Image: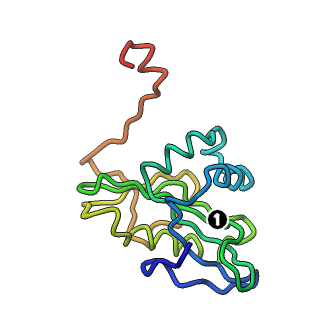
């Protein structure tokens, strides 16, 4: 987990130093599952370790860790996942910070890093979905998607199966 030159500078907090890492290829999916469950993240409540493994295979995992004094590694205290088609759009997923370290700038650093990450490619726009953090994202230029150019729609795979489409 050597420091990536694009990653944010470490953050000094009252709890210790928080450092940022691109752990796409080194993250243990079990650690992600434990972190998201411990933080009671409602949208990941039913994700399995195998699902985390597949999510890591198609996206970038940017993390924040509270470092033990003078060591690498440390407690996972923040994460965000970046997905991209590398040409048109990129999407931020799973922006989460440990409850005891919220409001210290960790989420802001993760989001800014994701938005400038070269892995996303030359995309036209970034997307995200949120139910409870819509006041957080405008500082980065995000706005509610009430424009008429597109409509966000979903279908569950169970519904596709019922229609014989999967």
Image location of residue 62, percent across then percent down: 51, 65
Q: Quadrant of residue 160?
A: top left
Image location of residue 116, percent across then percent down: 37, 72
Q: In the displayed structure, would residue 129 be above or below residue 97?
A: above
Q: Dot 1 corresponds to which residue?
A: 97
Badge 1 crowding class, 10 Å Cα cut-off, few under 14, some 14 to 19, many 20 or more, is: many
Q: Quadrant of residue 144?
A: bottom left
Q: Nearer the viewer, residue 42 or 51?
A: 51
Secondary-structure class at tag 1: strand
Q: In the displayed structure, would residue 68 be above or below residue 115?
A: below
Q: Nearer the viewer, residue 120 or 31?
A: 31
Q: Residue at x 39, y 13 (%)?
A: 163
Q: Nearer the viewer, residue 28 or 19?
A: 28
Relative to residue 116, is residue 39 drawn left or right?
right
Image location of residue 31, percent across then percent down: 67, 54
Q: How many numbered tags mark residues here?
A: 1
Image location of residue 77, percent across then percent down: 67, 67
Placement of the C terminus among the 4 image quadrants: top left
Q: Residue at x 66, y 87 (%)?
A: 12
Placement of the N terminus among the 4 image quadrants: bottom right
Colour convention of the picture? rainbow
Q: Quadrant of residue 151?
A: top left
Q: Residue at x 71, y 86 (%)?
A: 70
Relative to residue 15, is residue 96 drawn left or right?
left
């Amino acid at each position: 987990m050597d420091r990536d030159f694009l990653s944010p500078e470490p953050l000094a907090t009252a709890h210790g130093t928080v450092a940022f890492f691109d752990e796409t290829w080194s993250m243990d999916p079990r650690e992600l599952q434990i972190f998201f469950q411990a933080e009671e993240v409602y949208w990941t409540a039913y994700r399995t370790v195998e699902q985390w493994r597949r999510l890591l295979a198609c996206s970038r995992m940017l993390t924040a860790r509270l470092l033990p004094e003078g060591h690498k590694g440390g407690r996972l205290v923040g994460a965000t996942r970046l997905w991209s088609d590398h040409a048109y759009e990129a999407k931020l997923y799973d922006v989460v910070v440990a409850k005891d370290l919220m409001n210290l700038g960790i989420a802001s650093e993760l989001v800014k890093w994701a938005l400038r990450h070269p892995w996303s490619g030359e995309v036209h726009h970034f997307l995200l979905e949120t139910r409870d953090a819509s006041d957080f994202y405008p500082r980065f230029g995000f706005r509610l998607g009430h424009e008429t150019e597109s409509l966000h729609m979903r279908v569950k795979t169970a519904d596709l199966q019922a229609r014989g489409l999967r």
